[in-house]
Image: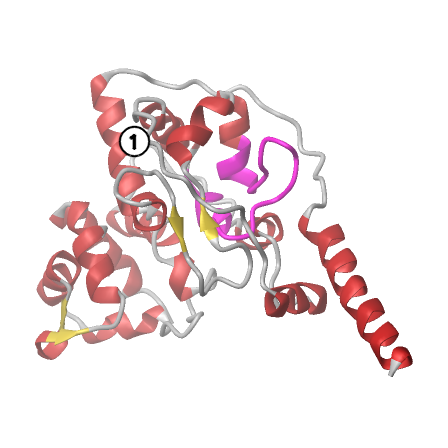
Amino acid sequence: MLVVLAIFIVTISYIYIRSNLIIYKKYNIGLVDIAIPHDSVSIAAGKKIALTRGCYGCHNNNLSGEVFPYWEAGMIAANISKKIPLYSDQELFRLFRHGIKKDGTGLWSMPAGMFVNLSQKDIGQLIGFLRTIPVVENKLPQTAFSFKGRMKIIRGEIISEVTMARKAVKKFNYPDNPTVVQRGNYLVLTTCTECHGYDLKGAYGSPPLLIAKAYNESQFVKFLHTGNALGNRELTMMSEICRSRFIHYSEEEIKSIHAFLMQLQ
């Protein structure tokens, strides 16, 4: 009995020590300067980025954080209204571009693999907006990793957002005067990949984006603005995301997304 107990204790200890070495790994990526605009037009653009890229969806409607008990890799979306003032502009840029926190450790939940493709201009506008949000008190528990999540981290089934960002980067050089399809390509890479996968072939139970070919342009605009799918269906999660995030995209932006998705093979 004592032998079994000893083996159990050693096994549990190994899992926690081994997973901690992965979870709290430090990354040596330097800081770079970035120009942050503070004019009203740029702040409004930054807020739109926050709305359409899901900041409010995970961090609560006042950005004060949220608990997600079903997450296996860190169950807390941080109170960013209190976190932002602790970061320099350069540290925030590194966070969005590489998924690396102030202390040099990596993110495990925020989709840096999607943000990595945001242009420097858009990241600057997002940071400019985040600098304007008021601090909101919201007591949250400490971030915790479930035992099952730790096992998956050790097996490589869950990887850090730093690794995800490195895999997801498309080196997409967004032109000054993009075509409709290029504009759609950029919006898809920085909006849809969080759920539909960085190769757009589906992930986390979401279908490949080829499914969009079932929609003509007007049907697609209606879907993303109302959440009503073909046949006036209500889709699990996607319909609510349409109403909370994509409603903030203009009709022309949604048309550009549709135009890009029609190019998929």
SS at mark 1 in the image: helix
132 sits left or right of 16 in the view = left
Percent across and percent down for residue 88 are: 51, 21
In the rendered image, residue 219 lying in the magenta stretch gets the answer: no
Quadrant for residue 134, please give it: top left
Residue span colored magenta: 94-118
The extreme front residue here reads 1
The residue under the point 58% across, 36% down is: 101
As displayed, is residue 142 above or below residue 137? Answer: below
Nearer to the camera, 262 or 212: 212
207 sits left or right of 225 in the view = right
The residue under the point 58% across, 23% down is: 32
The residue under the point 27% across, 38% down is: 62
User: Split into 4 quadrants, where in the image is the C terminus?
Assistant: bottom left
234 sits left or right of 4 in the view = left
Percent across and percent down for residue 168 are: 53, 54
As displayed, is residue 253 above or below residue 34? Answer: below
Residue that label 1 marks: 46
Percent across and percent down for residue 194 are: 41, 57
As displayed, is residue 213 above or below residue 245? Answer: below
Secondary structure mainly formed by the magenta segment = loop
In the rendered image, residue 114 lying in the magenta stretch gets the answer: yes
Q: Residue type at mark 1: give it.
A: Gly
